[in-house]
Image (tube, rainbow, N blue to C red):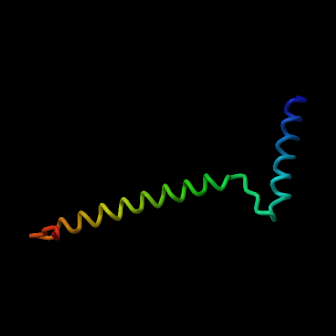
Amino acid sequence: MSILTYLHVVVTTRFAELRRDAERGDSPVPTAVIIFGLVFVATIVTGLALTKARDWMNAIPGHANPK
């Protein structure tokens, strides 16, 4: 039973430390992970927009690319 008590104290203490310093802007998620996520989503959205635009242009009868 002592291992459960120890783990409970460790987890509770860590959560208290994270909550205590909330005003300083500390985050449990590193900034690099957030930036990678934003770049990943932007790449997906840009790819989908490009695909939709190409499909739309190819649906026009007699469409020819400009020279």
**Quarter occupied by residue 11:** top right
Residue sitting at 51 percent across and 58 percent down?
A: 39
- Front-lying residue, 39 or 5: 39
- Spot occupied by residue 42 in the image (x, y as percentages of width and height): 46, 61
Residue 26 located left or right of residue 16: left
Q: Which residue is painted at 85% across and 52% down in the image?
A: 17
- Residue located farthest toward the left when viewing the structure as drawn: 62
- State which quarter of the image contains the C terminus: bottom left
Q: Is residue 22 left or right of residue 34?
A: right
Residue 40 location (% of width, % of height): 49, 55
- Is residue 66 placed above or below 6 in the rendered structure? below
Which residue is the extreme one toward the front?
A: 67
For residue 61, above or below residue 45: below
Q: Quadrant of residue 64?
A: bottom left
Depth check, front residue: 18 or 32: 32
Judge from the rendering whether residue 32 lies leftward or rightward of residue 15; answer left or right: left
Q: Residue at x 17, y 70 (%)?
A: 66
Camera-nearest residue between 54 and 11? 54
Q: Residue at x 88, y 29 (%)?
A: 1
Q: Position of residue 26 (x, y in %)?
A: 76, 58
Q: Position of residue 58 (x, y in %)?
A: 18, 65
Count the marks: how many?
Answer: 0
